[in-house]
């Protein structure tokens, strides 16, 4: 049981727990409807230590008894550690739910951990994990300190590298799943003081070398990296390492810091399962600048150099622009007259954010929850992809109550903390970064231009022809691999089977010549939409002349542009090259993909009855299909 004192002080962006938090926890019963919704609400508030532990244990029991909720991104995580991890692992299901993912864990500690990696473990194999968390700290490695001795240092560094490779290769051999490798933190004890950073064989040099090796191993194997070393730098090694708890209980870090560890892991799993947020929505008055623009005027708002508050608001704007550079969409939701609200963006000399940086600008006197829905609809994204930053506690509470799927950090009224809170909360966690991510914001801005063109067109055909679309088909490759895995794991609505594959599994499809793979890109006269579709098709077992579509997913942003038909035409051409006469498709319903229930029917497939399955199966005889005339220029380079 984790102490009740220090808990979620570590997670200050969570909302204060209401008085009825204990009642809500007590009322959340495993078999009842709405259990997951209640647990999700609990995950978003600042619970005491005992409350968080109870909630997370109850959530784990639910998964064990009933399985993961249908349609929710999920993961089974095997954990191996040289230390006592059970009390920290206890919090992982609740932390993962906070980031939109259902997670269960299976733990092997102490002396069995390295053996489980190197030789396998029957219980772990039976658990059948999706990922293996290698939760080893520096005490697990064959580190021999040799301060000042370069030869001994090189020998020790070599032994560390060899051991890390052995552990990772053992995980791959015995379990065949990606590893989550965690970086190491150097203990606070030093020998030379400030000279430690320069001395060969000291803790800093050995740990830095080990971390470089860990990252190299992860890159080579398409593994995930949990940056515990970075977390310790932020919290402080004197705080992280509790010598009394280590010697008494073999706890690798202070138990009161377990929420920070589980939160970090939860957001990483959320990111790999496609649950990271993609849009930051900003209030304006006393959030982006100090004061009220409608009352104080352009000269009266607080912004810029010369005051702590003015510089803090600039810092938030600078961070928002940094997020935009890495692909996060920026929007505005403010209770204001629109002309007043736009004035600082246009005319204030110290304003960093400008109108062109804001993809959707909603400034009016309507309800903010309603405006957030409008922003989501305009961008064609889910409400669960949004973060709303507002200094007003009443507005925050209202949005949380009406739109619980929107992330609303507890910003408070101190602007010096705003950018730090956004960064610390991990809403925009990433596991890869591609060229498509860089250009995403421009792509969404182009969508508004396309919408205007659609409104002015006489009919759909005129609109589509006016776009001058170029569609590009390529098989999977190394360059596209991170984005392909990203789409596979985050696309929920236009996804026929919602099967999830890791980057290493995507590489496996890439190498398999029997598997048909397509990465689909689209551009038009308004801009490049990047990769918007992924298809995986395999030879159908026991039917040499047939392909079965394993996965077909697309970005909802290209709906209505006949991209589905273009993809089918490409599949038919590939089938002809392989002497395939029949293509089969399968639709597996989830809570979110109902929009594609009739996908294959609309494309001319015939429904086939399959007993004992909730899926619908569809068949297309290629000889009977007539390819449509489509408004695309097709390229394959």
Image (tube, rainbow, N blue to C red):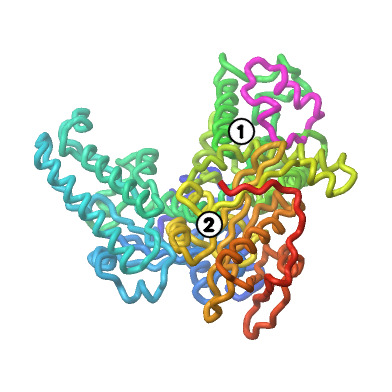
Q: Quadrant of residue 135?
A: bottom left
Tell which of 146 and 500 is nearer to you.
500
Q: Residue at x 81, y 35 (%)?
A: 364
First in residue order: circle 1 vs circle 2? 2
Residue 551: % across, % down: 58, 64
Q: Is residue 23 above or below residue 194?
A: below
Q: Is residue 27 above or below residue 165?
A: below
Check the image and name the residue furthest to the bottom.
Answer: 611
State how far apart marks 1 and 2 are (Cα): 33 Å
- Residue corresponding to mark 1: 413
Element type where label 2 sits in the image? loop
Q: Residue at x 51, y 54 (%)?
A: 476
Q: Is residue 100 left or right of residue 147?
A: right
Residue 124: % across, % down: 35, 72
- Residue corresponding to mark 2: 273
Q: Residue at x 70, y 49 (%)?
A: 557
The region drawn magenta spans 336-362
């Amino acid at each position: 049981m984790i102490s009740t004192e220090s808990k979620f002080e570590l997670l200050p962006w969570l909302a204060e727990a209401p008085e009825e938090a204990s009642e809500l926890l007590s009322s959340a019963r495993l078999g009842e409807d709405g259990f997951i919704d209640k647990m999700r609400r609990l995950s978003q508030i600042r619970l005491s230590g005992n409350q968080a532990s109870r909630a997370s244990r109850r959530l784990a029991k639910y998964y064990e008894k009933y399985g993961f909720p249908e349609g929710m991104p999920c993961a089974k995580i095997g954990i191996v550690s040289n230390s006592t991890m059970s009390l920290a692992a206890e919090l992982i299901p609740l932390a993962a739910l906070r980031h939109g993912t259902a997670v269960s864990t299976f733990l092997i500690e102490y002396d069995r951990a390295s053996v489980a990696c190197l030789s396998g473990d029957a219980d772990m194999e039976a658990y059948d994990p999706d990922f293996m968390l290698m939760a080893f700290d520096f005490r697990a490695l064959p580190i021999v300190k040799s301060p000042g001795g370069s030869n001994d240092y090189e020998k020790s560094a070599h032994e560390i590298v060899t051991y890390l490779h052995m552990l990772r290769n053992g995980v791959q051999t015995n379990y065949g799943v990606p590893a989550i490798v965690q970086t190491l933190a150097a203990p606070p004890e030093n020998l030379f003081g400030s000279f430690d950073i320069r001395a060969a064989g000291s803790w800093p040099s050995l740990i830095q070398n080990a971390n470089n090796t860990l990252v190299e191993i992860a890159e080579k194997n398409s593994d995930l990296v949990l940056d515990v070393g970075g977390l310790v730098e932020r919290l402080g090694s004197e705080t992280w390492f509790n010598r009394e708890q280590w010697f008494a209980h073999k706890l690798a870090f202070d138990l009161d810091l377990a929420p920070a560890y589980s939160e970090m892991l939860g957001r990483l799993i959320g990111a790999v399962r496609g649950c990271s947020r993609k849009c930051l929505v900003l209030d304006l008055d006393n959030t982006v600048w100090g004061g009220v623009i409608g009352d104080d005027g352009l000269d009266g708002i607080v912004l810029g150099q010369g005051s702590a508050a003015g510089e803090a608001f600039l810092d938030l704007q600078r961070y928002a622009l940094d997020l935009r550079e890495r692909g996060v969409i920026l929007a505005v939701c403010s209770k204001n007259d629109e002309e007043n609200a736009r004035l600082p963006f246009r005319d204030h000399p110290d304003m960093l954010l400008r109108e062109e940086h804001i993809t959707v600008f909603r400034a009016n006197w309507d309800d903010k929850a309603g405006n957030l829905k409008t922003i989501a609809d305009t961008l064609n994204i889910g409400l669960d992809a949004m973060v709303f930053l507002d200094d007003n506690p009443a507005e925050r509470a209202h949005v949380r109550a009406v739109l619980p799927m929107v992330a609303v950090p507890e910003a408070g009224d101190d602007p010096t903390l705003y950018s730090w809170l956004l960064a610390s909360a991990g809403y925009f966690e990433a596991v890869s970064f591609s060229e498509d991510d860089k250009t995403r914001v421009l792509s969404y801005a182009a969508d508004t231009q396309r919408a205007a063109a659609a409104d002015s067109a006489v009919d759909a055909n005129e609109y589509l022809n006016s776009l001058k679309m170029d569609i590009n088909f390529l098989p999977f490759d190394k360059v596209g691999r991170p984005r392909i895995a990203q789409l596979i794991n985050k696309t929920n609505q236009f996804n026929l089977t919602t099967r999830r594959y890791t980057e290493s599994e995507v590489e496996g499809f890439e190498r398999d010549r029997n598997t048909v793979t397509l990465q689909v890109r689209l551009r038009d006269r308004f801009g490049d939409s990047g990769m918007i579709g992924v298809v995986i098709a395999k030879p159908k077992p026991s039917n040499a002349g047939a392909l079965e579509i394993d996965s077909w997913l697309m970005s909802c942003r290209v709906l209505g542009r006949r991209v589905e038909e273009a993809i089918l035409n490409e599949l038919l051409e590939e089938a002809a090259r392989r002497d395939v006469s029949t293509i089969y498709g399968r639709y597996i319903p989830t809570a979110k993909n109902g929009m594609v229930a009739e996908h294959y029917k609309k494309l001319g497939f015939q429904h086939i009855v399959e007993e004992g399955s909730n899926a619908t199966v569809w068949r297309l005889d290629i000889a009977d299909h007539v390819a449509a005339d489509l408004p695309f220029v097709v390229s394959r380079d």
